[in-house]
Every structure is written in C-alpha cells, then in structure tokens.
Amino acid sequence: MIVKHVLTAGVALGVLSGGLATGLPALAAGEIKIGDINSYTRLPAHTIPYRRGATLAIEEINKAGGVLGKKLVFVSRDDQGKPGEAVKVAEQLRSRDKVALVSGSLFSHIGLALASWAKQRKTLYLAAEPLADALVWAKGNNYTFRLRPSTYMQAAMLAAEAAKNKNAKRWATIAPNYAYGKDAVAAFKRILTKLRPDVTFVGSQWPGLFKIDAGAEVQALAALKPDGIYNVTFGGDLAKFVREGRTRGLFKGKLMVGLLTGEPEYIDPLKGEAPVGWLVTGYPWQDIKTAAHKKFLAAYQARWKDYPRIGSIVGYNTMLAIAAMLKKAGSTDTDKMVAAMKGLSFDAPTGPITFRAVDHQSTMGAYVGWTVLKDGKGTMERWQYLDGADYLPSVEETKKLRKQ
Amino acid sequence: MGDFVVTLLTGLSSAAALFLVASGLSIIFGVTRIVNFAHGSFYMLGAYVGVTTVQTIGGGAVGFWVAILLAAALVGLIGVAMEVLLLRRIYRAPELFQLIATFGVILVIQDVTLWIWGSEDLVGPRAPGFTGAVTILGQRLPEYDLVLIAVSPLVLAGLWLLFNRTRWGTLVRAATLDRQMVSALGVNQRWLFTGVLFLGSALAGLGGAIQLPKGGADLLMDFNIIAAAFVVVVVGGMGSIGGAFLAAILIGLLQTFGIQIFPNSTLILMFLVMAVVLIFRPWGLLGRPEIPGHGVVEAPEAPLRPAGRALRTMGALVLAFLLLLPVAHLIAPSVVGDFSLVLTIEILIFVLFAVALHFIMGPGGMVSFGHAAFFGGGAYGAALLVKFADAPMEIAFWAAPAGAALLAILFGWFCVRLTGVYFAMLTLAFAQIAWSIVFQWGEVTGGDDGILGTWPSDWASSRVAYYYLTVGFTVAGILAMRRMLFAPFGYTLRAGRDSPLRAAAIGIDLKRHQWIAFTISGAFAGLAGALFVYSKGSVFPTSMEIARSFDALLMVLLGGVHSLIGPIVGATALTWLNDLFSELSYWRFLLGATIIGLVLLLPNGLVGLGDSWAGRRLGLASPGSESGAGPGSESGASDREAPA
C-alpha cells in the first residue's frame, strides 16, 4: 500500500517539477543579452520586419567588434498579444536569461504593462513601437523609454499640414474603438482647432478594431457631409474602408488624412487600390536618398531578400540606440544605463535621434507626404521628414503631462 | 430618404456573410450537438482558399464564381476531415468534450494558414461585372452589395429545398429532433453526420469566400466572426435556419443603423440584443424549447466520494512540494530558478480559476462560456480600488471576490433561468457586455490602456512572499469549495443537475441553489483575478475577453469534468504546456496538436488516465469507474446508444 502511494505521489511530483526546474544557462563572459518581447504570432505582418531590422543591427554591431568588448545577444520571445503573458516572459528573461534590459513590443497596452513591470523590477525597458502617449507621459516612469514617434507627435504633424488647406472646415473622423484610436483623434482635434479656430468637427465614427462594417461606416460618414476626413483605421479595416469609400464616392472632393496610412505595412497590401491623394505619415523607403539610409537599405535587402517596413527601421534604430547607450554607460548596471539613456544622442539611418531627458521620448521623426500610385503600388510623393523634436510639447508642458 | 434606403440596403448586404456562417454553425449544432468553435476558422479558410482559387482559375465572369464555389467545397472537405479523423472518435465522450477538440483545430488552422499564405493581409479580388456602384435616390451603393443581398435568400431557398424535398434532408431534420429514434430506425448516423459537417463547413467557407470583394483575408478573421456567428445562431434559435436568416438581418440592420445613431456602440450592441432575446425568449426567435429527455442522454454520473487515502496522501505531497519549492530555490537557485516561482504562481492562479468554474460546471451542471467576467471583475475590482481609493493590497484583496460576487449575483439572476447551451450563451453575452463596458469606459477603467501599478504591499512584494500568499489563497479556496460540495448544499446541487424534476418534487428551490453556487463560483474566480492583478502589476480588458473564458473552459474539460481533481490537473497541464511551447515559433500548432492528441487518447480528460489499467493499479481511478457506471468507461459505454 505504502509503496503504491509513494509511487502515485512520485508521478505527480515528477510531472510538476519537470516543468518547474529551470536550469540556469551559464552566463558567457563576453556577452550582453538584450531581451526582446513582441507579438510575433498575433501580428506577424508588423513584428517580423521589426525582428529582422533588430537582428540586422545586432549582426552589424557584433561584426564591428560588439560593445564594451562584448557581443550582443538578442533573446527574442513571443507575447501572444497578451499583456499578462508579456509580463511573464519579461520575468523569465530577467531571472532566467539574465538579460541586461528588455526592449520591443507593438501593442500599446502591452507596452504599458511592461512599463509598469519595469518600474517595479527596476529594469530598463526600451519600448520600440507602442504609440500610446501615456507610456511616456501620464504613466511614464524612470525606467521606461520610447523610440517611435508617439500618437501625439504623428497626429500633430498631420494636423499642421492639414491646417494649410483653407477649404476644409467641416471635419469628420474615423478611428478604431480603442485607446490608440481615441488618442489619435483627440490629439488631431486639439492641434487642428488650435491652429485653425474656424474648423468644426461634425462627427466621429468608432468601428471595432478589425471588425469594421465598412459599408455602414462610409454611409455614416457621408451623412455628416464633411470637407475633410481624418482616418486612423489600419490593416484589414483600412482595406475595407478604402474599397467601400471609393466605390461609394466618399473621398471625392474631400481632404483625406490618414495616420500611418503610408507605412508599407498598411499601404502595400492594398496594391493597386491604395488611396491616392491622402495626406499621410508613412515610410517611403524607396525614395530616401540619404547616404545612411541607402546603406541600411542595401544591407537589409542583402540580408533578408525583402524590402524594409516601418517595423524594420524601428527595430534597427532600437538596437542602435541600445548599443549607443551601452557605450555611454560603460556598464550594464541598470542605474547607469538609465542615466545614459537620458539625453542619449545617436545617428540613425533616418537622421539624428535624441532621447529627451524630460519624458524619455526619442525625437525620431516621421515621413509626411501624399499618397500616390506608382507602378500599380501605393507609395508617397512630395514627402518630407519631419523631426520629432519640433512636434513635442515644450519641457514645461511635458512636466505637467508627466506626473512623477 | 436616399440615405435611409441605402443604409437599409447596406445593412442587408452585410447580413449575408453572417447568415452563411451562422446557418452552417446552426446546422452542425442542430444535428450533432457539437458547439463548433472552429467554425470561424472555416470562415477564414474560405477567404484564403478563395483568394487562391480565384488566382488559379482566373477572375473572369464565370471563373470567379466557379472559384468561389470551389473554395466553399474545399473548406467543406476540410470539415469532413475534421469529422472523420477527430470528432467521430469522441462522440461517446461527455457532452461538450468535443469543444476542446475544436479548440485544438483552431490553433492548428491558425498556424497552418500563417505558414501557407504568409502573414500579410490579402486584399480580396473584385467580382467581375460588379465593381462599380449604382445610384439610388442620389446615393451610391456598390453593385456587389446587391449581389450579396440576393445571395442570402437564394441560399435559404436552397437549404429549404434540401431539407424538405430530399430524403437526406428529411433524415437530418429527424436527427435534429430525435437522434435516438433515427438511429433506432436503422439510419446510419455516421454518414449523416459527415454530410452535415460538409454542408456546415462549406457554408462557412462560402461566407468567407463571398465577402472577398468587400474585404479580404487576414489571420484575425476566425475569432472576429465566431462571436457574431454565435449571437446570430442563438438569437435565431439553435438549429433553425430560418431563425438564423432572420437574426442575421436583424443584427445586420441594427449594426448599420446603430453605427449612425451611437457611433460608440459597435462593440456592445450585438451582445445586448442577444442578452435581451435570451431573457425574454430563451430558445431564440424561431427556435423551439428543448423537449426534456430528447437531448443527448448521458449515463448518470457516479456520486462524488470523499478523498480516499491515496488522494489525501497525494494532496499532502503536492502541498509539501509547493511549500518547499521556495526553500529549494533559496538553497539551490541554479536548479530551481526564480522563474519556477513565477510559473508556479501563474499555474496556481489558473488552477483556482478553473476549480471555480468547475464548481458550477461539474457538480452544478451549468456550463459557463463567460467566466472571465468574474475573473476580470475581481481583477478590476481590486485595481479600481487601488486607482481611486489608493487602497492597500490587504483591502483590495477582499474587495475583489466581493465585487465579483456582486457581478455574479446580477448576472446569475438572469442566467440560472436557462439551462444547457442557452445558459452558456447568456453567460457569454453578459461577459461580453461587461468587457465592452470596461473597454469603453476609459475615464474609469482606463479602457484599453488598463490600470497600472497594482503591485503588492511591501511585505508581500518579494517573490517568495507573494508565492506563499498565492499558495495560501489557492489551497484555501480549493478546500473551501470542496467542503461545500460535500455539504448538503453540494448534494442539492448535484441532485438538481441529475434530475431537476425530482429535485423540485422533494421541495428544493433549485434555481436559488444554482444562483448561490453561481455567486460562490464567481467570488472565487474573482479571487483568482485579484491574485493575477497583483502578480502582473497591471490589468487590461484582455483579462475579461472571450479567450480568457475559453481558456478556463478548456482547462476544466481537458482535466476531466467528472472529477474534482480534473480542473486542477487540466489547469496545471495547460498552463505548463503553454509556457513550454511558447518559446517555439509554431507553438500554436504544437499546442493544438497536443490538445487533439490528448482528446483522442483520453476522452475522459487527463483524469481519465486514472481509468486506465495503470491508473487503477495506482488507485487513481475516478470514483465512478469501479462501479462501471462512469460515462465512457468500458463497461459503461457499451450499453449507451452512441451516435456513431
């Protein structure tokens, strides 16, 4: 009898402990590990280019001798699109893989969850792609930095351009029904009405994210009879909106403005049906003629046999930022790394970037221009690179936005 | 006026794809009683296969339509494959067990689709001849909308002819009404079921392919349509095709007009309609109330037995293991890393959540599809107190189960009036309503940005301290629920599950007992939610979403719904497997394939392992199996009228 019970328990314990025993990999002396977390299964179209850009940068840095005499190692993990999972993975990277810092993520809520975690665990977190303003302002903390231009910055750039059109006075908006969409609309409204007190916003449509009922939304927008429409939808929603809007003649004679609409991730799947004549933020990778970007483009295409997306350049810049920060800090001690991140300046293929000390937001800018069809594909014309520094609130204003 | 007419037509056209998907789901459920969660995946496959067939055949005036029908047929064949290879082998398993199999199929299809078609969204080909727009009263309407408006009635008519004018259709209708009778009359149900799966899946595939000119194919389509499809099926009446037609139009119009009047209502409207319909007409608009005794007859469940010596010993050893784990961590951190504690905390939280769900699902016989409402309700209850009252953890921890219990009292009052699948659907509706509120009420809940900074008080903030806190609450919670099930209350609950009529006859107010059980279950789910919030430091609407409810369901079913240790085993296994696989690139495929494998090997859940020879030798056998009455055990299964 006793033997039986011991056996029973032994099986149970074996099953339990098999999953729990996590052997600690030997920490190689000449390595600095960077923990990467992103939604690789939930939104692969946006995150795989990110990982490719990051990997390319790591390879180039290591080829040039690494940082502080050590090789950079990129430990990449999937967060399944869930904030709870991302926090768990972060714990794992920190305690098992002994990473020096954590970077990555695309969804805003996951970025926010990781920011909260970074503060609690006193670990450096460099948010690469999440756009939420709260990440560096209302919910900002000492350990969190963000590279990509935020929702506010990109909306501000578009509003400044849109304000130049004197005919567009009645505005309507359409945005996915979640935090990013709401932030994007609020920022655009605020800045446009400040620049042009004569405009009115006649209505807003809020389709569920990736659940747009495009025909109905287009009907509702048409009923508002606006002069200008500000679009924040993306992905499959954008494709449906554009197709339906064009067939129903919604865009005719209206100033169309699209946040992120010019990014290859969003405009390329539309192929020949890409919208024409929209004012957008995006990434016209084919036409950027600076030497630094040409070099990046050639290296990326050689390495991946594919062209870069916005995620690629963000991933690449993220790793450049980390390398520059490590050089400046001279150590992987978190306090020293955080101190080095503040005010860190480095040169990226898109131009010089600085992490503002006041809110930990980088000044990476965005490309703003007008969509056009070229060779049956959507791209941008008459674009310019706008430096993020010019579209961020002043230091005093930022201090008010940031609680701590 | 033109505005109104065009909006009306737009609503009708958007109902088309919804009707096709929902009618397929309804037919499959009506005959096989399988709640096919993989139906959304067939819709997605229809779209992807459609893009490929249109490219292959060429999108000419005839080619396009041939390609669309071909895509539907191919998806139908995939449905047949699922039936023959998978479902057919587990019809004998307890009701709803097939759910897990369809979960596995969802995961596998997601990764296979990603692998074949890549990650970029595909824009659908346009239908030749229908690319322009017609002008109606000064408003433009896409020509293809008119095609879609025509498709639904055509398909409806076709289905009516099929079901009323062919022998096969008559048999299907007969099987929908009374499966045993059809079987007794010598009809080979095997082929009937296969045929129904083909038809249902092909309709989903058609729905996916026919919406291509309006949209395209992307990897999120499966989960995006499935909730809407369930709403349509339930509102229309399960198994009723006419009902699905009516409900699809109702939902389509409501969405189209609703968007104009309340632009913010996009997330909540559908579920409000479903809740209202279920409350006032539980069997749907055109469905009929289920005739007692004519559903799936399950062998009565064996009574629960108090823990024997083997179980007590095992429990004590597991507890000792849990208590000693941090000690091992302190002594040998290189063997038992910090992360072992993190993972164990996560496992324990989900164990508590699964046990709470099992409390009503197993002994109560009430299957909830929306238990995340209480998990998230507890999580938000605690987080809101922190956010607005700056409450310390000690107070927030008690508020969480209390808040979840209040929510359960409210939802439960409506839900316990219903039974079976309708109960499940109403819980789903309420969970979605709760989710929408949390998601949209940004000023209070932070919306999608969630609530941050919910970390434990100082004394509990070290990993080991929080670990012991979790162990304490989880073990206490499990033992408390176990105690209740062996008290008269538990016996009453089980009496109500096994025979509501007899329970009522001896004077038991069954609904009240079920309501209380529902509330208790909600409270413990809320406690699990609070543990979750404080282990993650933040809470987001994802803790309330459908996927979270399904996770719990999966844990209970995978572990074994007939045993009290089932949910513990299921939650442990699933959380552990998820962590194990998630480091690999095609983890969804692996997890899905593992689930399917387990389902095929152990149709009674992981605890069913105990019924095997080795399990009996070890004294693990579930209580019923020795008397031979356990469903699915060898002697028990042979005298049951199995559908296959």
Image: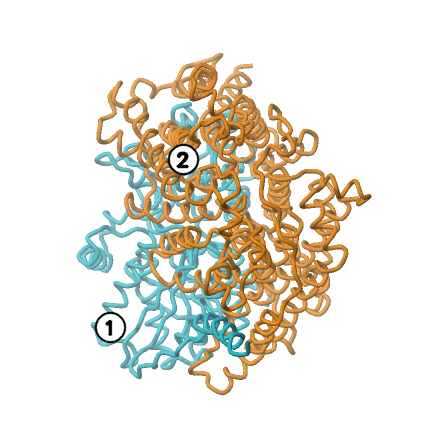
Chain colours: A cyan, B orange
Q: Secondary structure at mark 2?
A: helix
Say which residue label 2 marks.
Answer: B43
The reply to whether residue B334 is visible in this rendering is yes
Residue A98 drawn at (x, y percent): 40, 77
Q: Amino acid at mark 1?
A: Asn
Q: Nearer the viewer, residue B175 or A369?
A: B175
Say which residue label 1 marks.
Answer: A62
Q: Nearer the viewer, residue B199 or B565?
A: B565
Q: Quadrant of the C terminus of chain A?
A: bottom right
Location of residue A321 (image quadrant): bottom left
Residue reaching furthest bottom? B331
A9 to the left or right of B85: right
- Are there few (<14), some (14-19), or many (20+) residues within 10 Å of tag 2? many
Q: Amino acid at mark 2?
A: Tyr
Residue B224 drawn at (x, y percent): 47, 40
Residue B33 drawn at (x, y percent): 52, 36
Location of residue A116 (image quadrant): bottom right
- Are there few (<14), some (14-19), or many (20+) residues within 10 Å of tag 1? some
Depicted A200 relative to depicted B351: above or below: above
B512 to the left or right of A197: right
Residue B75 drawn at (x, y percent): 34, 34
Q: Nearer the viewer, residue B107 or B77?
A: B77
